[in-house]
Image (cartoon, rainbow, N blue to C red):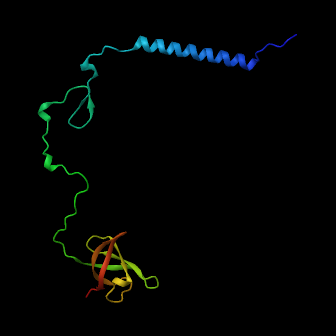
Amino acid sequence: MAKSGQTFNKKEKEKQRAKQRQEKAEKMEERKANAKKGKSLDEMMAYIDENGNISSTPPDPSKRRTINVEDIEIGVPKYEVGEEDPIRTGIVSFFNEGKGFGFIKDLQTGESVFVHVNQLLERVVENNKVSFEVEMGPKGPNAVNVKKAL
């Protein structure tokens, strides 16, 4: 007796492929039956309301706002320097003499400002009240011309 050319696995795979083809054909027929071709233009339109949300109803013309083109700013707005005092006061919150740097807590803004030993005009220690100027460095604000306040 001769063996059949197909094994059990081959028969199962063939059945599975046939089943998938049948399901695919059924889905295609269902899509054709439920297709909504021939929609009117009004049914396909979408509108944006005054809040920027998509809606199916047209926006109310009475709520329309006009925007002046000159008022639109593209990019980051320029920092405008005001008439604030360039000399600030603060308290040395941390200073490491061995490493040569520390931080000053600005009394006006409350932010910490980095200070390097090269920018000191007088020797300072922690909790000293100092006056200083601020320059922007590559990593943030740096204190320069630091001296003890009276």
Q: Nearer the viewer, residue 77 or 92?
A: 77
Location of the N terminus by quadrant is top right
In the rendered image, residue 103, in percent from the top left (x then y), is placed at 37, 77
How many marks the image carries: the answer is: 0
x and y, in percent, of residue 32 in the image: 43, 12
Q: Position of residue 51 (x, y in %)?
A: 23, 38
Q: Is residue 83 above or below residue 42?
A: below
Q: Taking 138 as reference, is 49 left or right?
A: left
The quarter of the displayed image where residue 64 is located: top left
Identify the residue at horizontal 80%, vertical 13% (top origin): 4
Report which quarter residue 121 is drawn in: bottom left
Left or right relative to 38: residue 96: right
Does 5 sit above or below residue 127? Answer: above
Relative to residue 30, is residue 147 drawn left or right? left
Given the current orientation, which residue lies at the most extreme right position?
1
Residue at horizontal 19 percent and vertical 68 percent from the top: 81
Q: Position of residue 150 (x, y in %)?
A: 25, 88
Q: Residue drawn 46% across and 85% down? A: 98
- The image quadrant that residue 59 belongs to is top left
Which residue shows up at 22% across the image and 57% down it? 77
